[in-house]
Amino acid sequence: MKLKLATLALGATMAAGPVMADLVFPSLSYRTGPFAAGGIPFADGYADYFTLLNERDGGIGGELAQVPECETAYNTEKGVECYEATKDLGALVYQPLSTGITYQLIPKVTADGIPMHTMGYGRTSAKNGKVFSHVFNYPANYWDGASAGVNHFLEQAGGSLEGKKITLLHFNGAYGREPISTLEALSEKHGFDFNAIPIDYPGQEQKSQWLQIRRERPDYILFWGWGVMNQVAVQEAANIRFPMENFMGIWWSGSENDVIPAGDGANGYKALQFHNVGDDYPVFEDIQKYVVDAGKAAGAGDQIGSVLYNRGVYAAFLAAEAAKQAQAANGTSKIDAAMMRDAMEGLTITADIMSDAGLPNFGPAFNVTCENHGGEGMAAVAQWDASAQSWSLISDFSPSDASVVGPLIDADSAAFASENNISPNCN
Amino acid sequence: MFYREAGDFKTSYASDNQTFPIKFDRYRYYAVMFVAFAIVPLIINDYWVSAIFLPFLIYSIAAIGLNILVGYCGQVSLGTGGFMAVGAYGCYKLMTGFPEVNILVHVLLSGGVTGLVCVLFGLPSLRIKGFYLAVATLAAQFFLVWLFNRIPWFYNYSASGQINAPERTFLGVAVTGPNTEAWASYLFCLVILTFCALVARNLTRGMQGRQWMAIRDMDIAAEIIGVNPLKAKVSAFAVSGFFVGIAGALLFAVYLGAAEAGDSFGITKSFLVLFMIIIGGLGSIFGSFAGAAFLVLLPVLLKNVLVGWLGWPTDMAAHLEFVIVGGLIVIFLIAEPHGLAQLWRVAKEKLRLWPFPH
């Protein structure tokens, strides 16, 4: 009996043990907890894209990619444990998908020399590569999002927001508080009234917040929510018959999971996006063929084409592309974290590169430089159609207001540099 | 056989009342201290420190602090997370405000500040007891987290409300910040934990501890025999706050490096530390260590076994982890309602007679 058990255990270990490979992309995911609804599709997309590269192309430049997963449950303490557990595997880039964990890892990755990519989240001022040498937040960040949202409302209001009221409904945490300073600066510039209403973790109960909204009657609401609080907010907005076209979420509050529970009431809800939506891209056919049909999908395989799955695929695509450019620049397929960082700092994404990867026009084309780790900050607005059950972009990708966002980034990164004795430079 | 009192003669009051009166126990204690101070620092790496040792050491300090209040003095508190936040934010303000002062001083000072805050919220305990006091301390938890989110001065007006620990050195070695060596942060916390445990042990077996226990067991009787309830309760809140504040400061500065009130010091933290002392054993210093070890180490162990060794999907392992840890808590509390410390006591009693029980 004992022998049998030992054999079984050994067999299980061997069958499920990690594939030995050279390119390691750790996935600090969260498939449990109140934010799992957002964490699962992203983690699936991230893993599936690398599986596709392994199955279809034999890896990246001939080297298989390995995606060890570690569950953080959006908890900063588990995030630290996961980082320490995976960094010695030869990790090339970290994508923690949590602003809180990002803040914790910024000093650590810089000391360990591993790049971190916080796509559309994290510390916004990391755009300044002179201070944050190992942190990247291309192609867009929260302050770009705040500015793009206000620009859209400006257009909607016919060119002037003078005397209008804009409310920021936000998660009361690092993530939700990021845009406040930008919106305050924008309110001075455009002359609108701004106030912020926080929602505490996890946000399943928002009656008091929406009572306040009913009392104050804002013209527009910007929404920085995540996980289960998104569905609740959209449902509450529908309950008080708030005009949905004046209610806009950031890209983390704009997935199918967030609007479907509210049914027809959610029709017209808007959300910002920094990449395209839908499943009409060649890469998804390949994922279906090589990954899902072959039984190698990370999840159930039913999320393909959903907003957050696409974002996971996009994150993996940008990481794989940086790895490819690192291989080309160094003339070796076996790259390390330092080469990866240099390649991310010189990353160029063009329309051709996206088409070759099966993602034509999926996101904006951009360049990364040492001075600008954040790309051009292009964002578009998507709108939910409840009858067709789909998101569609209703605007082009347009840049944010650099005259407002730029000085804020300089001020915040300078504060970080002086607190931590960093002398800003490009080497 | 080895574990016995026979032949171990005590000739002074001090030796009769020492913490480990049995020779075997005493040598085991010296061995543990030797391994912890002299051997572990030589062999640990970043993973062991960040995932296992630092959380264990820091939560042990917090559990000792809460045990003084709940286990020894009988005042239920659900405000531990909030009080740890006071320690963390106090340490942050001191670190950034007075960079030239030693970090050890900052940690102890933030403990002192937390002690004062804790006394303030402990004052209602003079009038209300039991569940009602629990609700009053729960209010402290929510109020403190709200305060640290609300007032930008506490987080030096940073955009996101996060606080970051800058690099600070102790005797020329970095103990906070990203460039810290594993052994340095480990030893720093271990020294503070040893100090806290010794202070707590000596407080609880002296007159102060007896006053606390008298209040816990029956406050009216205690008052009749001359224990001043005001002094006893307020001192319990102050001492408890001091330890909890130190734990909060270390959690932020040494372990996490960055923190945010709602996320790192929420109500779940209060419950976690309370569960530690309930599982470990109320009114026992050893129980604080045992409870902290149980709730910190078991999830990490389970994760490594299920995901790293058996290769299960991470979400299934995470869910199963809740089931197993929860199940074990239930089993332990049914089998031994007085916690792991009582199991240890029973084991020691049995060992004294072993192998000749009759």
Image (tube, rainbow, N blue to C red):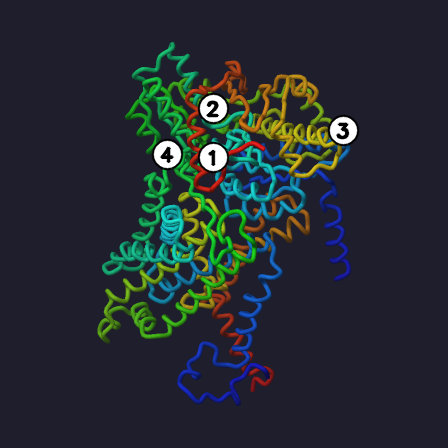
Mark nearest the camera among 4 and 1 is: 4
Q: Amino acid at mark 4?
A: Pro
Mark 2 and mark 4 in contact (Cβ < 8 Å)?
A: no
Q: Which residue type carries mark 1?
A: Val
Depth check, mark 1 against mark 3: the one in front is 3
Residue position for label 2: A144
- In the image, residue A354 above or below residue B342: above
Of B230 and B40, the residue lying toward us: B40
Local SS, label 3 = helix
Q: Quadrant of the N terminus of chain A?
A: bottom right
Q: Which residue is mark 4?
A: A198
Whichever of callouts 3 and 4 sits on the residue coming sooner in the sequence is 3
State the separation of the CA atoms marked 3 and 2.
35 Å
Q: Chain of mark 3?
A: A
Mark 4: few/some/many CA within 10 Å (<14, 14-19, 20+):
some
In the rendered image, the residue lying farthest to the top is A158
Q: CA distance from mark 4 to mark 2?
A: 20 Å
Quick one: label 1 or label 2, which is nearer the N terminus? 2
Visible in this render: residue B299?
Answer: no
Q: Which residue is mark 1?
A: A228
Residue type at mark 3 is Asp
> Picture coordinates of residue B308 (x, y %)?
66, 50
